[in-house]
Image (cartoon, grey):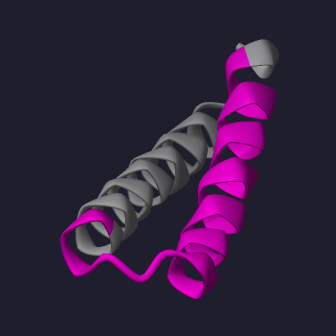
Amino acid sequence: MTIIFFLSILLLGASIFLFFYTAETHTVKATKKFALTFYALVGISNLVSIIILAFNF
């Protein structure tokens, strides 16, 4: 259970980093919009997972 918790935190940090990196570097609108949406969804799902795991402890 704690391994899943730490992996969720790691993936959340990676998605936040990639979100801002993509927002600053990519200029193609379709690619940028898709990537930002994907990273936002991954970040939100990991945040929900972390909250659920925190309540289970």
In this rendering, would 15 be left or right of 49?
right
Q: Quadrant of the C terminus?
A: top right
Q: Nearer the viewer, residue 57 or 31?
A: 31
Q: Residue 43, relative to residue 42: is it above or below?
A: below
Q: Is residue 32 magenta?
A: no
Q: Residue 11, relative to residue 18: is it above or below?
A: above
In this rendering, would 34 be left or right of 9?
left
Q: Residue at x 60, y 55 (%)?
A: 15
Q: Give percent across and percent down for residue 8.
A: 65, 36
Q: Quadrant of the N terminus?
A: top right
Q: Residue at x 68, y 19 (%)?
A: 4
Q: Nearer the viewer, residue 37 or 8?
A: 37
Q: Residue at x 60, y 45 (%)?
A: 50
In this rendering, would 29 be left or right of 24?
left
Q: Give percent across and percent down for residue 11.
A: 66, 40
Q: Residue at x 73, y 27 (%)?
A: 7
- Number of numbered callouts drawn: 0
Q: Quadrant of residue 53?
A: top right
Which residues fall within the magenta stretch?
4-31
Q: Residue furthest left?
A: 30
Q: Nearer the viewer, residue 47 or 19?
A: 19
Q: Give percent across and percent down for residue 35.
A: 36, 60
Q: Nearer the viewer, residue 54 or 21?
A: 21
| Secondary structure predominantly adopted by residues drawn in magenta | helix
Q: Is residue 21 magenta?
A: yes
Q: Residue 41, relative to residue 23: is it above or below?
A: above
